[in-house]
Amino acid sequence: MSSIAYVTDPKMIEYHRLCGNRTINFWRLSSQKRFSDFRKGDLLFFYTRSAKGKRKGFVGYAHYESSQKMSLRSMWNKYGRNNGYDSKEQLEEAVRKASRDGQIPAEMSCLTLKDVVFFISPVYPEDAGIQISPQLESYCYLDQEDPQATVRILQLAEKIGIDVWSTAQSYESESIFREDEIRHRLAQINRIIGNASRSRKEDQKARSLAREFVKNDGWEMIRSSQTDCLRITGDKVTIAIPFVHQVKNRDERRIELFGRIALYKLYIAKTGLDLGTLRFEAIQADEDQPDIIQLLEEFNHE
């Protein structure tokens, strides 16, 4: 799981905001520093000056979908105004200004970003306890040294609110924002809880079960875990945890499973995270076992 802050052209971002663009082509000069750890679903925060301010802050974010190299002509033919400009000529001018020699590269790195969310006003790094160099020209990772950085940004953004105009253009923005906050808060809680105390063989089995499980519709891994899974459907959140055991240690593993569930519930309550309806499931290799089902029902109805 990675989040990055990217120094962004304020005019381009304002164009996307006013147009209510949900999918954008975020172009980069090919000579710029390459990402070393950025995957589908990770967050790219737009780090720029707002239309009314001089300080740089996070004015919104989007989810990384994919990347490819494209010529300017191909960019315009494929994305048009989703490049952030009204015309190909305006796009050319922006690329020339960004290029050190004033030339348009034969190819540029293009990031497809989806589910764009804008804030009513900027979230400033210092307010979130984040230090960003004034000399930053391209981007920096937010979570590498501080795993809670993204959560703090989202918490401040929640207090500020989602941009009314862009939300009116795209009614799903508030839902997207809520789900992102849930994902990152649960990832933070998962890191606090730590890994289950399985043997190496059991852990391999648990990871295999989880990988198969997330192929089911709507399921995904909790972002800091390779075993615990998550599904968000409206105002209902479900967490699924593999139940892997050997004959000799079944009772011990059962206690650990429900201890893990209890820790999730405890830390969710402590953080004040409103998940609506919260449920837990056990991912099992064999047929569902009656005692596990009964205990899960009791936990889910507390």
Image (spheres, rainbow, N blue to C red):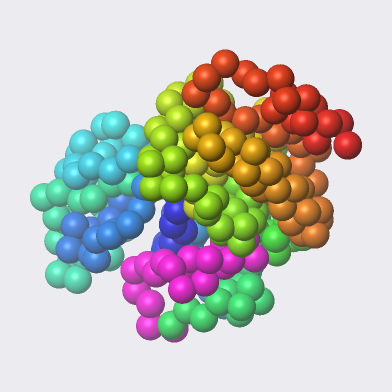
Where's residue 284, x and y in %? 55, 26
Q: Is residue 158 magenta?
A: no
Q: Is residue 12 above or below residue 97?
A: above
For this orientation, the residue located farthest to the right is 302
Q: Is residue 149 magenta?
A: yes
Q: Is residue 196 above or below residue 32?
A: above
Q: Which quadrant is the C terminus positioned in?
A: top right
State left or right for residue 192 relative to residue 209: right
- Write down the quadrant of residue 176 in the picture: top right
Q: Nearer the viewer, residue 302 or 289?
A: 289
For this orientation, the residue located farthest to the bottom is 134
Q: Which residue sits at x=21%, y=36%?
A: 74
Asked whether residue 117 appears in the rendered view, the answer is: no
For this orientation, the residue located farthest to the left is 106
Count the numbered circles shown.
0
Which portion, as a residue range, is magenta? 134-153
Q: Which residue sits at x=26%, y=39%?
A: 75
Where's residue 146, x and y in %? 52, 72
State left or right for residue 43 relative to residue 39: right
State left or right for residue 82 relative to residue 171: left
Q: Which residue sits at x=38%, y=77%?
A: 136
Q: Nearer the viewer, residue 288 or 65?
A: 288
Where's residue 66, x and y in %? 33, 40
Asked whether residue 92 appears in the rendered view, the answer is: yes
Q: Which residue sits at x=39%, y=69%?
A: 140
Task: Provide the major secondary structure of the magenta segment.
Answer: loop
